[in-house]
Image (spheres, helix red, strand yellow):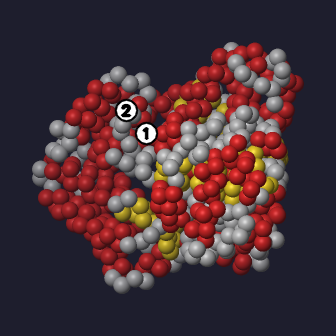
Amino acid sequence: MSDEVDDLFGDGGVLARGLPGFVARAQQMAMARAVVDTVESAGTLIVEAGTGTGKTYAYLVPALVAGKRVVVSTGTKNLQDQLYRRDLPRLLGALKVPARTALLKGRSNYVCLHRLERALQTPGWRYDDRLNRIRAWSRSTDSGELSELGDLNDDDPLYARVSSTADNCLGAKCPDFAECHVVKARRAALAADLVVVNHHLLFADFLLKEEGFGEILPGSDAVVIDEAHQLPELATQFFGVRVSTRQFRDVAQDAQTEAEEWGDLPDLVTAAETLAAAVLPIEALFASINGRMRLEDLLARPMVPQLIDALDEQLFTMRQTLKAYEDRSPVLAGVFERAAVLYERWTVLTAPEQPQGLVRWVESRGRGGSFHQTPIEVAENFAKMRQAHAGAWIFTSATLSSSGDFGHFQRQLGLDDAHTLALDSPFDFQNQARLHLPAGLPEPNDPAYTTAFIEAIVPLIEAANGGAFVLCTSHRALKLVAQTLKIRLGQTLFVQGDDDRARLLERFTADGNGVLVGTSSFWEGVDVRGRALRMVLIDRLPFAAPGDPVFEARLSAIKQRGGNAFFEHQLPEAVMMLRQGAGRLIRDVGDRGLLVIGDPRLRSKPYGRKVLEALPPMPRIDRDAALVWAASL
């Protein structure tokens, strides 16, 4: 099939004839050839495809015309939808191939007909007008995806009431199993030639396969991982053990609801109420935690071991009480199974001895938080995942290397045997963009640094009349930047956290001259084309903040084996993140923009040159030239 690439992607080829506006790109054709060779040889390929390469088509077209079964995994549900609902229909129309495609998401994305009916019978919920609207919609929807409702966010308590999780799903015992939207979606995925999933689901399915239930990977000839730079962090989460306070509350609530319906299980009602009460002080404890911390440090606090022991005792009691009634109904059997699994994981997390190579930590989130035990390195676990599927593996992203060196990414996932390919962006950065490094800023650890950075960027934003992303590396910096810019600028200010990310981007783009201030969630996966985004201003190099337990454990492991933690891990991670942020600037052939990075270490530190070399090749200009360039955008 490698010979067909020119006929498909070249000037006057199939795609040029079938897709209005399609332009042949040498980089896209090079990637497509590499994908074809990898699929045919069942090999492993890592492709860094610069912005504008057209990597999505470069892997989708070979997948569609090869006549093989392919799984495509994307970074987010939004990218899933974009790929499945926009890119695939266009390509199928142009290629005129009869490939069957399917979209598959995690079960919590679909309405659960059984839980919906139970919610309609539950005091406190049955009179909620939204429930009746959801019921009416559930009778007409084809997909069952709750996102179709539009205004039901996944953090809404009602969302959890009408969807299921792996914990509370009754499976084949469910009275609505025959009409289950999750079951229908999985059946469609099994029958498809190309299945679009996301990374969370891919990992979850592999772990289910370990238990005999996985369905996505088996039988596929190739797995394509888009936005592959996200994989190492996600692998850390999935190859560990996690227990959340919400799981305790949900088990207690579901057990109590079922016990009260039976009416003759007072001991189960008591056990549920006692377990729920034991969770409350743990949730209060999490309220005092900012982000992540080591479990050992939490246990060193006064009274914390006693609170943990009390929760342990009540969970054990709940499990034993449920065991006596598991034969009463599928729901009680399911709650017992959840309590048993929860107790097993809890026992692992709170065992006196921590196995080598693992780190235990806690994280506050929402109303409560979660307990974790995760591997410091994931290469061995990920190797097992690849070995379980002998087909081709293709990893692609705009940022996987540092100046063409893929070593860091390969080491993290154990991909030493992979072929690598680095493709530059086809955009003309020499003419489309400029880079400005403000002079005279203090060191980033200076308390006055953020204020000095703001003083440096305000004139540039004013000269360009907005159209700017200000990307911060911490929430503290974001708060100060947002407060100051709100006073200093006349342009409309959009601040992360003020609204849903998608709505913020929509409003920013529609404004045309807005200024958006954001942290990590705006550094990647954001595509604003045209003049609405003409400046990206980054406060400092995005080195991971010290204190994160997993990060510190990784650095310690590198040092213990005699490595250099900074150059082996910290710097490559920062470079990859910086490239993601810088990549927001030029998204189309007609875009023009200014990239500003405030961090003086790019000038003063020996590694600064290496960082700059990893960025797109744009001319570097001083303050006066930057003001002129900004005004011309």
Residue at 75% in and 28% down:
62
Indicate left or right for 26 with 487 as reference. Answer: right
Q: In this view of the protein, which residue sits in the foreground, 92 or 343? A: 92
Give the crowd class for mark 2: few <14, some 14-19, many >=20 residues within 10 Å: few
User: Of marks 1 and 2, which one's residue comes earlier in the chain?
Assistant: 1
Q: Give the residue type at disc 2.
A: Leu
Q: Position of residue 302 (x, y in %)?
A: 36, 84
Residue at 61% in and 71% down:
449
Of all residues, the one furthest to the right in this rendering is 3
Q: In this view of the protein, which residue sits in the foreground, 70 or 47? A: 47
Indicate left or right for 243 with 200 as reference. Answer: left
Q: Which residue is mark 1?
A: 109
Residue at 77% in and 41% down:
432
Q: Which residue is mark 2?
A: 149
Q: Give the residue type at disc 1.
A: Asn
Label 2's element?
helix
Q: Which mark is residue 391?
A: none
Answer above or below: position of 37 versus 213: above
Between the C-alphas of marks 1 and 2, the distance is 11 Å
Q: Quadrant of residue 218?
A: top right
Q: Quadrant of residue 336?
A: bottom left
